[in-house]
Amino acid sequence: MEKNKNQSQTLTSSPLSSFTPSIRCIVKLGGAAVTCKDELEMINEEVLQKVSEQLRQAMIASSEKPPGMDWSKRPGGSEICCNPEEFGDHSAMECSPFIVVHGAGSFGHFQASKSGVHKGQLNKPLVKGGFVATRISVTTLNLEIVRALAREGIPSIGMSPFSCGWLTSERHISSADLSSVAKAIDSGFTPVLHGDAVLDEIQGCTILSGDVIISHLAAYSKPKYVVFLTDVYGVYDRPPTEPDAILLKEIAVADDGSWSVVKPKLQNSIELTVAAHDTTGGMKTKISEAAMIAKHGIDVYIVKAATSHSLRALNGDLRSSIPDDWLGTVVRSLR
């Protein structure tokens, strides 16, 4: 049994009533899934395109693909694609209320770890330079993800926590103005947030991970379900690269945030590792934040991105029952 420490403690945020209409799903797009983590600032274009396609299928009821909204020139391209006549009165542009949050993957982690941004001390020139460099990197990735979603006809809007005034205190969220997120959704847009370098009231600055952002958003917006898209099939009892690694199918969360594995029954303890360059806590933080979400009665599905299993999770097909052939991890309340 693991005890979770909530990273979103005493804070100020916009009221629950600001989220109208109600949020159907919050999606965490794992950085390791959409980038090549062993290659600095390299996007996995194939996975990102497939994920964007699946999000469009889950969000837009029409079988007809809506017109694309990326009217900017792409690297290597010679033309800008924009046909105003495609729009008209296009009912296919009506999207279910989703929020997307993505991690950094091979963007941002290098800059943050080299400069020690996550440890604070913004008065040091190296930390200040690293803060700027980290934000340049993560906002570059954010733009590319927004563009990929826009090409699928999803009206995506990039929103950076730093620019929206999110603050931490000793690495816990202390202030987060959610009104801009709520207004974007109310206006028919899909907000796309990301892990970011932010100011900290005690230590000067830190890294706010996408997993912590999702936990905070879920507590205030109360989505029907949450999906974590990763580069592996779910949570394992040890690093999934090891030959005897076991996929954990279901994790139950108690009212105090502690969690335990329900399926399968395990004989040994669970080993959670964090990559040396990962300044956000890796899988350990992911499970802790998923547990905090599930504590509110919201099911969380952790699943491999760009697979048939991820599409079923995004569609909400798993809310009534979990099929035996579905590969992934469900984190849900004991209640």
Image (cartoon, rainbow, N blue to C red):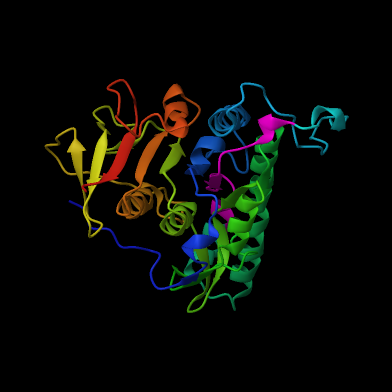
Q: Tell me, yes or no, if residue 153 can be seen here.
A: no
* Closest to the observer, 39 or 324: 324
Residue 208, image x and y in percent?
Answer: 50, 61
Does 333 appear above or below 205? above
Vertical relation: 152 (above or below) 128: above
Q: Residue at position x 56%, y 34% from top?
A: 59
Q: Is residue 179 at all visible to an observer of this figure? A: yes
Residue 108 located within the stretch drawn in magenta = yes
Left or right: where 234 falls relative to 229: left
Residue 101 locus on image (x, y percent): 53, 48
**240 w.r.t. 117: above or below:** above
Magenta segment boundaries in residue numbering: 90-111
| Numbered circles on residues, count | 0
Name the spot of residue 60 as percent of width and height, x first. Answer: 59, 31
- Residue at 34 percent across and 63 percent down: it is 6
Q: Nearer the viewer, residue 145 or 189?
A: 189
Residue drawn 23% across the image and 45% down it: 252
Does residue 203 appear to the left or right of 158 in the view shown? left
Find the residue positioned furthest to the left.
267
Residue 27 covered by magenta stretch:
no
Q: Picture quarter containing residue 183?
A: bottom right
Horizontal side, residue 176 vs residue 224: left or right: right
Residue 146, position as x, y percentages in the image: 66, 43
Q: Residue at x 27, y 27 (%)?
A: 243
Residue 130 shown left or right of residue 220 in the figure: right
